[in-house]
Amino acid sequence: MKIKAPRGTMDILPEQAKKWQYIEKQFKSICQRYNYKEIRTPLFEHTELFQRSVGDTTDIVQKEMYEFKDRGGRSITLRPEGTAPVARAYVENKLYGDPKQPHKLFYFMQMFRYERPQQGRMRQLNQFGVEVLGSKDPAIDAEVIDLAMTCYKELGLTSLKLVINSLGDEESRAQYRKALVEHFTPHKEELCKDCQTRLEQNPLRVLDCKTDSEHPAMKKAPSILDYLNEESRSYFDKVKSYLTTIGVDYEVDPNLVRGLDYYNHTAFEIMSEAEGFGAITTLAGGGRYNGLVEELGGPSTPGIGFGMGIERLLLALEAENISLPLTNQLDYYMVTMGERADVESFRIIHYLRKHGIQVDKDYQGRKPKAQFKAANRLNVRYVLVLGDEELDKEIINLKDMETGEQEEIPLTNLVQTLTLKEV
C-alpha cells in the first residue's frame, strides 16, 4: 500500500523550495527596511483563542478548524490564521509595557483549515503577514498596505488591484448592522442557510457570501460608507490621503467586509487581475482590529495587519510569466580517479567547506567520465580533478566548464585561489 500526502497538503521539493527561499529572503529584506521584526508563535493554540478573537459565527471557527483534545482533555486547535496568535503573544509577554511602541512584527506561518482543496487553497497553507500593535495613526494603515504592495511589486507583479473600505468604529457598525438586518430580512428565505444564520448573528458577513453574491438584494444593500460617523469618516479620509501621497492606487469597495469578526475601520484586499489567474483573485487581505488585544485580556491597544498566501503568490507569478532570479549553479565539483584520490578528496572538500567554499563530490562510486556528466547535470562552473599523479605533485587540476581551460593549483594555495575565482 502506497501512503500519499493527506488531501489538501503538498510536498515542496528542492527545486520548488528555492522559490520559497527567494521569496522569504526578499520579504525579510523589505521588512527590515520598514523596521518590522520577526515573531514566531506555536503551531497550535487553545481553541478558545480563535473562538474569542476570530468569532463563533465565522466559517473558520464553525467549519474549518482542526480541533482536537490533547491527553489532558484540553481543546487544542492547529493555527488557522496569524493575527490572534500574535495578539495573544503580545498580551502574554506584556509587550504593551515595552517603551518602544508600536510593535511592528512580521511572520511566516503554516496555517491549517479544513476546506475543499482547490488551486491556491490548501488545507495546510503558508502565509506571510505583518501586525502592528500600539498605534492608531492612520499613517500606519497606509504603511502596512504599502508594505504589502511593495512585496508584490518587487517580485515583478504588475496586474494588481488594491481595494479598500472602512468598517467604522463600534457606533458606526451598530448602525450599519441594523440597516443590513432591515434590508435583508424580507429576503431571508431566499438566502443560503449560512446567510440566514449570519443575518441574526453577524449581518456584515452576509455581504461576504459567495453563494448569494449575485442575489439582487446584495447589489442593493446599503453601503457602510453611508453609516460612518464623523470620526470614522475622518479616519478613512486620512488613510486614503496617505495612500495618495505615496502614489499607491486604490479602489473603494463598500461591500468589502473581510471574514473575521475582529476587523474595524480600515479593511483591504489585494487582488490579481492577471489573465487566466482563476476565479479566486484575492492574494492578500487585512485590516484594523482595535479591541482584539483587550478581548484577549490586555489593555486597550489598536492594531492592524495583513496575511498573504505564498501558494497564491506563486500562482500569480506564474500567471504573469515571471521567473524568479534563482541561483541554480554549484560552484565546484570534485572528480576523483583512484581510491587514494577518493579518500583524500573527502578531506580536501571538508577543508574547503570550512573556508566558505561551495563544493560537492560523487558518492556513488562512478567512473571519472560519469562524474563529469554528473557535474554537467549540476550546472557546475568549475571541476576539481584529483588523481594519484596530482597527489604526488601536491596539486589539483581546475577545469573551467564554460571555456574548457585547465590550470594546475598547488594544494597549499587552493583555498586562496578558489576564493578569488568569480563564480
Image (cartoon, grey):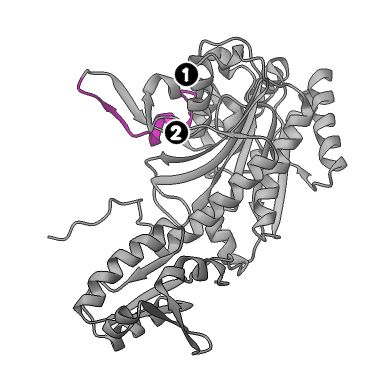
Q: Secondary structure at mark 1?
A: helix
**Which quarter shows the N terminus?**
bottom left
| 77 versus 271 height, above or below | above
Residue 323 belongs to magenta span: no
> What amino acid is found at the position of numbered circle 2 in the picture?
Ile
Neighbourhood count class around disc 2 (C-alpha, 10 Å): few under 14, some 14–19, many 20 upward: many
Query: Which residue occupies the extreme left position in the image?
Result: 1
Residue under numbered circle 1: 52
Residue 80 x %, y %: 43, 35
- Give 352 or 175, whichever is nearer the viewer: 352
Quadrant hosting residue 110: top left
133 sits left or right of 380 in the view: right
Residue shown at the point (78%, 46%) measured from the top left? 250
Q: Residue at x 62, y 15 (%)?
A: 98
SS assignment at label 2 = helix
**Quadrant of the drawing holding the C terminus:** bottom right
Look at the image and give the residue range highlighted in magenta: 55-71
The residues bearing labels 1 and 2 have C-alpha atoms spaced at a distance of 12 Å
Tag 1: Cα neighbours inside 10 Å, few (<14), some, or many (≥20)? some
Instruction: Determine whether, in the image, residue 211 is placed left or right of residue 333.
Output: right
Q: Residue at x 62, y 36 (%)?
A: 286
Quarter occupied by residue 278: bottom right
Percent coordinates x, y for residue 167 in the rendering? 70, 27
On the question of residue 379 being in view, the answer is: no
Q: What residue is shown with label 2?
A: 60
Residue type at tag 1: Arg
- The picture places residue 188, in percent across and down from the top left corner, at 55, 31
